[in-house]
Amino acid sequence: KNGTSTMDLIPDDVPPVVGEEAKQYQSVIVEGVGKQLGGDEKKLHEFVLKTRDYGKGLISASDFWIYLSKIFDEQKALVFLPKLARLIPDTDLRRALLKAPKMAEIFKHNEGLGEDIEDEEPAAPKFVLSPDEGPLPPPILPPHKPNNAAAEENPFDDDSGPSVLVGDAKQVADMFPDLPHPAILAALQDAPVSVVIEKALHGGIDVNATPKTIPPPKRGGRVLSGKTARLGAFGKFPLDVLPSHMLPRDLGKLQDMLPTAPTSVLQAELQVTSSMPLAMEALTRDVAHIEVNDLDPVPVALRGYMIKSDPGGRSFNRRFFILRQLTGSLCYAKVPEDMDEPLGVIYLFNCRISAAPPDARAAVAASYTSAEAASGFSLITPHRTYHLFPPSAAEAEAWKTVLQQMAMLMVPPEFEKGEDVVECEVFQNETYGPL
């Protein structure tokens, strides 16, 4: 009535509950959420898992807020948020969650498909369970199998069979099996999945609609040929499959849908098409545009939490990291929302990686149960050594793989001959190139 919105009433912080009070408070929260979800045990179990994942730092505050605003309506989620935040003991995570709705409003104009891979928001609305619980089952796509020997010998093939409904389209089709698939695809071209589901509930979907044809995008002044090749045909790209929750938003969506596809090929397909819908149309048929072969592999812009050592290597803090491809640097801040003004930047020129020393592993194991101390590694630069400890062995391998790829790209030919007389200079070369 006085012009103050519910969002304006969200505090910057709330007092956390601890001990026996926390257990009782958690029971009240879970019981209330169960009633709000109409007694749906599956959705309630999912809510508990998502909340646990956020508390462990496995998903960002913006991702968790998107999830909450989907299972409740936004106004109810805003009222519920300060109550839920009291269950989060970590001050940085608690404040980041309370800040998430306002950040979502600020960045709402950046939502959409085909954004720059490096500069987009650090996460996507996808949620990964803790390693010991296993991930939620992703959509499984049948691999493309040639029908004859000639097809096996020629990996380039324009006719790769019909598209398979995946992701949002599959979700809508499962909920409304009577809706024609073309009508679902057409609706999703004009509105997000939540709006499409709402329209379908009220009979607002045009059952005679067909999806609009997406014209081939231009790249460097030329139109893509439209020819495709099976994903296994792009042999110069690394075969590494990186954890989807560590990837930029659109790339993470593709990795979730194609859990065995090499991440670098998916990234290259996004790069040549400059269009998430066009990339999905090809990749869901287990193919990519042949123009991918014109690109050189580029390290993936990983992001995620790690435990980081101080300059003396004796104390440790939890920080969120993003690999910046264009500047060849690793930036870090307390939470993803603070990455516009990072606490520090590590330039990867002339750096190398080794195992973390035993004393650092012991210190982290004693203080941070969320980190995989045995998988920690040291990032050694000309001016400082950083001891880094990701939450899991899989994430540690992903970081080491991509950082080593980046370090190799930052070394010009004259340095490979041993003439490494310049330190800490960042540059681009023909091998790396701009995204």
Image (cartoon, helix red, strand yellow):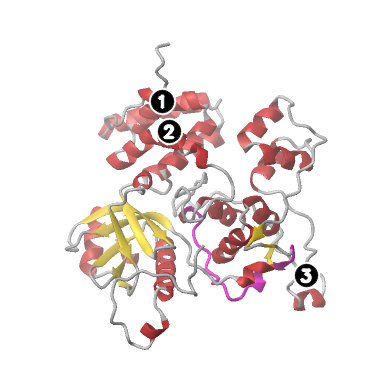
Residue that carries the numbered disc 2 in the rendered image: 101
Sequence-wise first label, 2 or 3 = 2
Seen from the viewer's position, the closer of residues 36 and 100 is 100
Residue designated by label 3: 146
Kindly identify the amino acid type of the residue bearing the numbered disc 2: Pro
Frontmost of labels 3 and 1 is 1
**Real-space CA distance between mark 1 and mark 2, rounded to the nearest whole angstrom:** 7 Å
Residue pointed to by mark 1: 7
Along the viewing direction, whichever of 271 and 403 lies nearer the viewer: 271
Q: Is residue 186 left or right of residue 121?
A: right
Q: Height in image: 252 above or below 409?
A: above
Residue interval drawn in magenta: 226-245
- Amino acid on which the number 3 mark rests in the picture: Pro
Residue located 61% across and 56% down the image: 274
Please give the name of the residue rendered at 36% of the width and 49% of the height, measured from the top-left corner.
Answer: 339
Circle 3: is it few (<14), some (14-19), or many (20+) Cα within 10 Å?
Answer: some
